[in-house]
Amino acid sequence: MAQPEFPEPPPEPSSPRLRRDASSSKRRFCNYGGYVGEESFRKKRCYFFDRGCCIYGDSCSFKHSSQSEAKADCCSAAADAGGYHKKNLCSLFMLPGLECPFTSSFCWNAHGPSELRRQPLCLPPLEGIKQGTRLRCISSGLSAADASEVWRSLSEWVIIGHVKVQDLVLADGMPALVDGYMMVPIQPAGAVELRYFSSEPDEKGTARDLPITDAHIHLEEVLRTRRFGFGWYAKALRCRCFLPNCKQTRCLFAHENEKLRSFPALRAEDLASLRDEVAKLPGARIVGIVQSCCGAEVIEDTLQLVKWGREMMDGRIYATFGIHPNDFEAYTSQVQARLEAALDACGTQGVGWGECGLDFNKRADELEAAPELRQQMRQVFINQIHVALKRGIPLVVHSRDAEEEVFHILDAYVPREHYVQLHSFMGSPSMLLSFLAERPNTYVSVPGALTWAWSWKDGGLRELAKVLPVDRVLLETDGPYMAPAPYRGQDSHPGHVPWVAHTLAVAKGLRTLEVLEVASRNFCHFFGLEHDKHENGKKDHPRGKGSSLNGRKGLKPESPNQDSWFCLKVEQYFSLYAVFDGHGSKGHKVSQFVKDNLPKLILMDERFGKGSAELPDMLKENFQKTQDLIIASDKMGKLNASLSGTTATLVVHDHESKEITVAHVADSSSVLGRRKGTADFEAEQLTRDNKPNLKDEKARIEKAGGMVVFDGYANHRIYARNARHPGLNMSRCLGHLLGHQSCGISAVPEVSQRKLDPEDEILLLCSDGVWEFVAPLEAVKLVGDYGPEQAMEAANALAKESWDRWIEEEGGAVVDDITVVLVYLK
C-alpha cells in the first residue's frame, strides 16, 4: 500500500494531444514543478496555466507564459467545469483541526461537497467497433470542446469540426492506433478519439451482464479519499521521506514535534454509496472485490469492510493479509500472528496472503545507502511466502523495479503449481512470458495504468498486454491509486474496471465484454470461488489432470534453483516435455536460456510435424544450434557459460502415431512405466546417463585431449590435460564452454524412438536428484498408486521421497534441486 506523497503531480490529461499547428501552442506539455524550494519555483513551468486552468493568477509560484499573455484567460478558465480543479475535497478544509491556507476560489480542491466536480461513471465501448457502429460523444477529458473535436483523418491532426456532447456519430471502420491514440474514422469524413466516445447499445436495448471484479484494492483508502480527498491522511502519518530536512512549505505529514492525528473513521454509508454508484452502470454486477490489508494498522478496517460486505453486498468483499515491502521494518512475528488471526476471522472471505514482495523504487536512495535494508526486505518477503505455502492459499506479489529478483525468489521458494498473483506487474514481456510458461497457476492483475498515455511507449504496458495470455488475466484498480482514463486524478474504485478491460481489449483485439467475462472466470478460479452460482463458499483449487510437475529447491541458500522445465502441447497433435538441470555458478541462467530457446528452434523447424523419420536429425541439429546460441551469448557478455551448463532431456510425443522420440544430454533420465497385469508395473529407462567412464564416451574425450579421472568418492570426472577444470561428471551437456573446447564434451544428444503400447501408462522426466535415491521401478510404482486426476499429489510424493532420502543420506548438510515431470499417457 504505497502512501501517496503530497502534493501529487497533477493528473495527466485524458487526451494530451501535442498540437501540430502553431496556433495551439498553449497546449504543449511541460513538467510539473513540485515543492523543490522557493528559489526554484519560477524556473518551473505552471502545469495548469499551460492547460488553461490555473486558478492562482498573479499569486502562482510557478512560471506562466510571457507577461503579455492575458491572465484573465487563465483565471476565467477556472470556472470551466472541464478543468482539473475541484475534483477532490480539500482535506485541510474538511478535517477538524486543520486549516487550508487558501480561500475557496484559490484552492484547486473543493471546500465542501457543493463545490465537488466528481466525474460520473460511464461505460467504455463494450462491443467491437466496426463500420456502422453508433458512437455517442461523452465529456471525459479536459473539456467538452476537446472531447468533441473531429479531425480530418486518422493521421491528420487538423480540426474540421465539432460534435456536441451526447450527439451520435457513425463509425466508418475499425479503430486504429495512431501516435499512441486510438482513433476511429467516422462518416461522412473525419476521425475522433475513441476514449471520448461510447458505443450505443443495439436498438433492442437488451440488458447487458457486466461482471465486475477488482482483484486488488485498498478499499479503506478509497472510502476515505472519496470523503476527504487524497490528503485524508494529513498529519496522521510521520514525514519519514524528508525528515529531518523536509523542504515542503505545507507538508501534510506530521513532523517530530507534531502530534499524530487518528485516521478518520470508516462509515457504512460510504460503502453503500460506492456500491450504489457502481450499480448505476447498466448491467453491472459485482462478482468480487479483494481488499488488500497491507499492515497491522489496517486489520480492524479490513474486518469491518468484510463484515459490511456480508451485510450489504452478498459477501462479495474478500481480503488478503500481509506486510507491504515498503513497510518491511514493521514486520515481526507478533504482527504476522495478528495478520494470520485476522485472516482466520474472515472465514471464507479470507482468500490469500499479501501484498508482499520487493519494492526498489519508493525508497531507492535509502536502500542503496544501506544494503542490509534490502536483505531485510528480502527476508520479510521469504517469511511471508512460507505463510502462504503453509496455509495453501494464493500469494499476492508486489515487484516494483525488482521484477527479476522477485522471480528468482519465487523460483527458489515457491512450488511451480502454487497460485501466485503478480499485482500490477510492469516488468518486461519476455521475462513475464518465460515465468508464466513454467508456472501454470500464476496470474497477472492488470491495473488502470494500462490506460495512461505513456503505456503506449515502446516496451510499455500495452506491449505487455498484447502478449499476456487471456486465461491468466485479472483486473484491478489498486484503488484509490492508478485511476484509468478518463478518470485519472480521481480516486480509483471498482466502477472503473470496465475502462481497464476496454483498454486491454483494444490491445488484444477482443471485445470489452469478453475481457470482463474471462477476468471474472479467472478471478473465481484463482481465489477458489464458485463462478457460476457466485456462492460465497470457498472450494479447493481444481487440480490438473494427465500431467503435473513438482520442484524442490535444494538446501543451498546462496544459490537459486537451477532446474528448469516445460510441458508444451502443440494443438492436438504433439506434446513436448523437457527437464533441464543446471550446474556451475550460473547454471540457473544456462538452464533458463536453453528452456527459452530450444523449444522455439524445434517448433520453427520445417521438419517438425512431418513424421518421425525426420525427428532424430532435426533434434540433434537444434541441440547444436542451442549450443551455438549459448556461445554467441557468452561472447556478447549476456550469458556466462564458460564453466556453467545444463542437462537437457526432451520428449516429443506424437499423439496420432502414438510414438515418442527422446533426445538427451547428461543425466536427467527419462523412464517409461508399463502396466504388468492388473496390479503391478515394470519400468523401462529411455535414456542412458552420459558418464565419462562409459567406454565410447571416454574414448571421445581422450581423443579430444581430455582426461577421465576417478575422484575417489563416487564419480569419474573430466579434466583438461595439465589443468584443474572443468571437473565435470558428465560427458555431454549444453553450455560449459571450456569443457567443450578442451575436453571433448559434446552437445549432440543421444536420440531414441519408441512406439507406445496400450500397456504404457506413465512417463517420467526427472533431474538426477530423484534417480540417485529412487530406482526407476520404485518411482513408477510410487506414482502408479495414484491416477491422472491425482497427478499433482503423485509428483509431490515422488519429489518428497527422494528429498527425504537425500536428507537422511547427507545428514541434512547438502541437498540439490529436485524436479519431477510426470505424464499420464492415458
Image (spheres, rainbow, N blue to C red):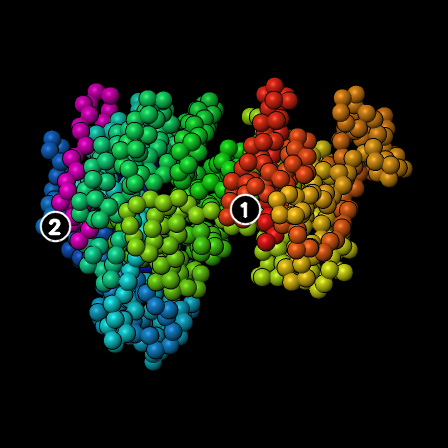
Residue 252 painted magenta? yes
| Amino acid tagged 1 | Gly
What residue is disc 1 on?
787
Residue 231 sits in which quadrant?
A: top left
Q: What secondary structure do most residues of the magenta stretch adopt?
A: loop
Magenta segment:
248-276
Under tag 2, what secondary structure?
Answer: helix
Relative to 646, 567 lies left or right: left
- The residue under the point 77% across, 27% down is 715
Answer whether residue 454 is visible to the viewer in this image.
no
Camera-nearest residue between 799 and 143: 799
| Amino acid tagged 2 | Glu
- The residue under the point 19% across, 42% down is 308
Lower sequence index among marks 1 and 2: 2
Q: Is residue 720 above or below residue 606?
A: above
The N terminus appears in which quarter of the rendering? top left
